[in-house]
Image: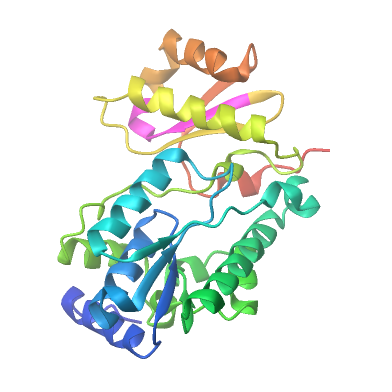
């Protein structure tokens, strides 16, 4: 839709779009999409007209929360951090195929409460046009049902264009790898618990430190119940398969003697696995 527009033109359109929202609360996950929406909102409305909201729960990596707090400070905006309790929602904890719907529903309900209390006229998310092309995004449905604005998607701005805008504006995270909540690492049908989330977070943190210098960008530790799957950049797979220390670190992180598979990272790969009984 916007293939014939320059990055500067798209950036200006995004600012113009958000300028009509009024005081805006941006649901900030730490990813590049919500970062660009937040930066555009500040350009459109000024720091006083923008707030960030991050749902704090066991599924949010601690490193991401640190990053979002830094972003809020750099933009000079308020940062709201309500504690959400997704694990108390039976449909979420059961980890069925609609898990993301219940997660986003919880997030948006917290955002609506904050918006009402703090005087925000709109809630915006980082959903982009590429996301709309994904055949399985139940979270988008939940956000739409609760009136969330999606400026990137509405303007037809896709993932690569989002990165281009971030680079155009000099945002230091313009090339940050895609991220997702910790629950997305657990195979559907395996109940989500704080212990499972914690060991995934520990494993990814120690492996990221261990692989530092290798040049690997994407990393996921997938809890498949009876085994563990580590996903890394394709050109790092052979090297990591031969690294005994990787298995030691996984064991020490809480995965014990579970078998380990190392494969190339692919976003959405968990949606292709059969649901555990």
Question: Where in the figure is residue 51, as x and y percent of width and height?
Answer: 39, 69
Please state the extent of the stretch shown in magenta in the rendering: 228-236
Location of residue 261 with respect to 168 vertically, above or below: above
Front residue (pair 75, 125): 75
Q: Is residue 104 left or right of residue 74?
A: right
Q: Is residue 218 left or right of residue 5?
A: right
The quarter of the picture where residue 256 lies is: top right
- Residue lying furthest right: 277
Residue 136 visible in this rendered orientation of the protein: no
Tag count in the figure? 0
Location of residue 36 with respect to 196 vertically, above or below: below
Residue 149 visible in this rendered orientation of the protein: yes
Question: Where in the figure is residue 11, as x and y percent of width and height?
Answer: 23, 77
Q: How is the image coloured?
A: rainbow
Location of residue 157 with respect to 179 vertically, above or below: below
Question: Where in the figure is residue 261, as x and y percent of width and height?
Answer: 55, 23
- Residue lying furthest front: 117
> Residue visible at 45% across and 15% down?
246
**Is 137 part of what is drawn in magenta?**
no
Front residue (pair 100, 78): 78
Question: Where in the figure is residue 58, as x and y percent of width and height?
Answer: 59, 41
Q: Quadrant of the C terminus?
A: top right
Location of residue 167 with respect to 12 vertically, above or below: above
> Residue visible at 76% across and 53% down?
89
Front residue (pair 209, 215): 209
Q: Is residue 146 left or right of residue 37?
A: right
> Residue visible at 40% across and 19% down?
240
The quarter of the picture where residue 36 lies is: bottom left
Q: Quadrant of the N terminus?
A: bottom left
Q: Is residue 257 left or right of residue 161?
A: right
> Residue visible at 34% across and 24% down?
209
């Amino acid at each position: 839709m916007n293939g014939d527009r320059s990055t500067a033109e798209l950036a200006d359109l995004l600012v113009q779009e958000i300028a009509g929202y009024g005081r805006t609360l941006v649901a900030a996950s730490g990813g590049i999409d919500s970062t660009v929406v937040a930066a555009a909102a500040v350009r459109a409305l000024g720091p006083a007209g923008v707030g960030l909201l991050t749902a704090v729960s066991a599924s949010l990596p601690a490193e991401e929360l640190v990053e979002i707090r830094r972003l809020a400070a750099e933009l000079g905006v308020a940062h709201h951090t309500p504690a959400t309790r997704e694990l108390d929602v039976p449909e979420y904890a059961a980890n069925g195929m609609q898990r993301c719907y219940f997660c986003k529903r919880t997030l948006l309900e917290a955002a609506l409460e904050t918006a009402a209390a703090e005087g925000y006229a709109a809630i915006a998310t980082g959903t982009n046009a590429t996301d709309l092309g994904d055949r399985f995004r139940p979270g988008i449905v939940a956000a739409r049902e609760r009136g969330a604005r999606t400026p990137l998607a509405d303007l037809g701005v896709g993932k690569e264009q989002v990165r281009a805008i971030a680079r155009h504006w000099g945002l230091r995270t313009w090339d940050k790898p895609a991220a997702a909540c910790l629950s997305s690492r657990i195979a559907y049908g395996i109940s989500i618990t704080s212990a499972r989330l914690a060991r995934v977070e520990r494993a990814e943190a120690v492996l990221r430190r261990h692989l530092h210098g290798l040049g690997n960008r994407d990393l996921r530790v997938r809890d498949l119940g009876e085994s563990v799957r580590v996903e890394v950049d394709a050109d790092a797979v052979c090297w990591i398969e031969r690294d005994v220390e990787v298995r030691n670190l996984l064991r020490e992180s809480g995965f014990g003697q579970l078998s380990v598979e190392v494969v190339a990272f692919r976003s959405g790969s968990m949606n292709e696995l059969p649901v555990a009984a």
